Image (cartoon, helix red, strand yellow):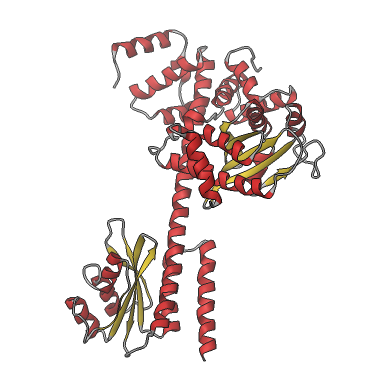
Amino acid sequence: METSRDQVIIDSFVSMADNLVADFDVVDLLTGLADRCVSVLGVSAVGVMFASPTEKLRPVASSSETMRVVELFELQAQEGPCLDAYRTGRQVGYERLLTGTNRWPRFTLVALEAGFETVLALPLRLRETVIGALNLFSTEENTMDDRDIMVAQGFADLATISVLQHGAAIESQRVNDQLTQALTSRIVIEQAKGVVAERAGIDIADAFTLLRNYARSNGLRLADVAQAVIDNALDLTVWAPPTTLEASRERSTRGDRP
Amino acid sequence: MPRLARIMAAVDEAQGDERSPTRLCEVATTVIGVAGAGVMLMSGDVPQGSLCTTNTVSNLMEQWQYTLGEGPCVDAYTLDRVVVEPDLAKPTTPRWLAFTPRALEIGVRAVFGFPLHEKTVRLGALNLYQDRPGALDAEQFANALVLADIIAHWVMDAQAAAPDGSIAEELDSYSDFHYVVQNAAGMVSVQLGVSVTESLVRIRASAFRENRLVKDLAEDIVSRRLRFS
C-alpha cells in the first residue's frame, strides 16, 4: 500500500518535471498540480492562487469548480491562509478551522459552511521570490501528516520553478522578438536611403535628411515612409535633385518642423 | 572558486568602467586562451551583424561568414550546438568550402563556434579561433560555454532596457550590422529595376565571384565607384 502510494508520488514528480522542458500552459500545469494533490494526499480540495503584478492574489486553478470552493479562494485575496502564506513566504497551518486561531473570521465562516474542517497553505516560493500560494482543504480530521505536507511542498516547489522558468522564457522571447523587429525596421530604413540616394543622385546622408523631413512634414513614422519607398508605393518624383534637397535644408534651418 | 564566479571576476576586472561587448570578447580570448574571438548576431537563420571582434583576423572571419553565409558561427547558430574544427587545413568533416580557404589565407588554423542562447531564444554565436591546429581542452571548453552564456545574457539585458521598437543603444553603437550593404541594395534596386531582396542576391553573387567581402563591394556601390546595370 505504502509502496504504490510512493510510486504515485514519484510518478507525479517525474511528470511535473517533464513540464519544465516541454511547452506547457501554466493553467494546465497548476490544475494538474491541484488534482494530483487531491488524489495523492487524500485532501478534499486544492487551489492555487497567483499574485498579479500589483501583488493581488487571485485563484488560477483548483481541483474543483464548485461555486463554494471558487468563492472560498476568491475571498482569500483579502483574508485567509493563502494571503498569509504569500505575504510571509511561510507555511500557514495545518489548522483546524473550528478550534483554530480565528485570525480569518470571514474566511473561516465560509470554509466551515462549505464543509471544510482543516486548512493548509503553502507558499509558491523560490528563494526570495514568492509568486503565490497553494491551498489545501480537508473535510476529515487529520488527513495530512508531516510527510504529506513535505510532499505537498515538493509539488509546490516544482510548480513554482516551472512557472518561473516559463515566464522567463516568455520574457526572453519577447525581448528577442523586439530586437529582431527593430533590426528589420532599421534595415528597411537603410535600404530606403539607398533608393532615394540613387533616385535623387545624392549621398546616403542627404537621402536620410529627405526621408526624415518628409516623414515629419507629413506626420508619418520614418519606418513607414521607408517601407513605402521600398514597396514603390511612394511617388518618388518628390525626391528630384537637387532643388528638393535645398528646399528641405532651408525649411530645416528656418525651424519649420511640425 | 567556482568557474562562473572566477570568470565573472575576470570580466568585471577587465571591463572596469567600460561595459562593452568588445571588452567581453577580449576577456573571452584571455580566459579561454585563444588567438581571437568574435560574436555574430543572427536571426531567421541569417547573419545580421557582428557584435564585436578582438582583432583583424577575427573581424575578417565574421565578415567572410556574413558574406558567404557559412562558417562555424553560422553552423553553431543554425544547428544550436557547439561546432569544432581543430584542424581547418585537414578537416575531418569537409564543410564550409568557400569559407575555409579564405580563413586559412588569413592565418586561421582552428575554429570553434559556441551558440549564444538565453532560455529558448537563439541569438547568434561566439566564434573562437587559433592560429595553429589543436582542439580546446576540457577546461577551455567549459570556460567557453560560460562566456557564451555571459555574452548572451549581456545582449538580452541590453535589449531589454531599450525603448520599444528600437535597437538598444549599446548594441547599435558597438555592433556592425552592415548597414552599408543595405544602402547599396537600395541603390542597386533602382539601378537594375528589381526588388531590394533581388539586389541583395545580386550583390552577394558579385562579391562571391570577385572574391571580395560584400561590405567592400557595398562601399564601392555607395561611393559610386561601381554601378550595376
Q: Residue B54 falls in which quadrant of the image?
A: top right
**Looking at the image, is A52 positioned above or below residue A70?**
above
- Image-based side of A97 in relation to A153, left or right: left
Residue B170: tell me if it is visible. yes
Which residue is the extreme one toward the front? B1
- Observer-nearest of A47 and B150: B150
- Image-based side of A41 in relation to A254, left or right: right
Looking at the image, which residue is at 32% across and 11% down?
A253
Q: Position of residue A244 (x, y in %)?
A: 41, 11
**Looking at the image, is A65 positioned above or below residue B121?**
below
**Looking at the image, is A165 positioned above or below residue B186?**
below
Q: Position of residue A103 (x, y in %)?
A: 19, 76
Q: Position of residue B151 (x, y in %)?
A: 53, 42
**Looking at the image, is B211 positioned above or below residue A243?**
below
- Observer-nearest of A8 and B221: A8
Q: Residue A211 falls in which quadrant of the image?
A: top left
Quadrant of image for the C terminus of chain B: top right
Residue A232: tell me if it is visible. no
Looking at the image, which residue is at 55% across and 23% down?
B183
- Image-based side of A162 in relation to B59, left or right: left
- Observer-nearest of B146 and A9: B146
Q: Position of residue B132 (x, y in %)?
A: 75, 34
Total labels: the figure holds 0
